Image: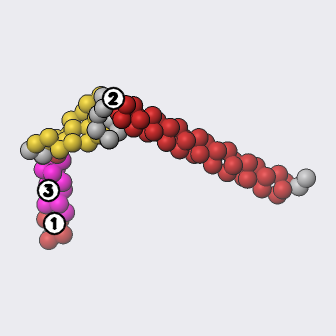
Amino acid sequence: MTRLDFYRKLRKYRKHCFLAVILAICLLLCGLYSVDYSIGMLMGQDKHTGLFKMNYTGNSLYEFSIMNNKAYLNTFYLKREIQRIKNFFRADARE
């Protein structure tokens, strides 16, 4: 076996391993989604999954829920910082 054939087989093996890992992750996520959906149906809840939810709760406030662990994101500060960056580049372009 020449060196070229060895590295060609090695690249092919790595690609197959990578695809196998991606397929396993996809199967795991599909399984989690289907279990979450069926549990919600059995418990009489709405037909949505509870694994991941995002709700707009008010004045520039978003609530993220991942497996019943809640996190809040206040977009007021993000919008303000983005506006400051835009103003900085606009002022820089004028000079």
Question: Pointer 1 and pointer 2: residues touching (CB < 8 Å)?
Answer: no
Which type of secondary structure does the marked residue at label 3 adopt? Answer: helix
Range of the magenta residues?
77-90
Q: Amino acid at mark 3?
A: Gln
Q: CA distance from mark 1 to mark 2?
A: 54 Å
Q: Nearer the viewer, mark 1 or mark 3?
A: 3
Q: Is residue 88 visible?
A: no
Res. 90 mark: 1
> What residue did someone put label 2 on?
43
- Indicate which disc, 1 or 3, sits on the residue closer to the N terminus: 3
Quadrant housing residue 85: bottom left
> What residue did someone put label 3 on?
83
Instruction: Name the side, left or right, on which 50 lies relative to 16.
Output: left
- Indicate which disc, 1 or 2, sits on the residue closer to the N terminus: 2
- Indicate which disc, 3 or 2, sits on the residue closer to the N terminus: 2
Q: Nearer the viewer, mark 1 or mark 2?
A: 2
Residue 83 in the magenta stretch? The answer is yes
Coordinates of residue 77 in the picture (x, y in percent): 14, 44
In this view, the residue farthest toward the bottom is 94
Q: Nearer the viewer, mark 3 or mark 2?
A: 2
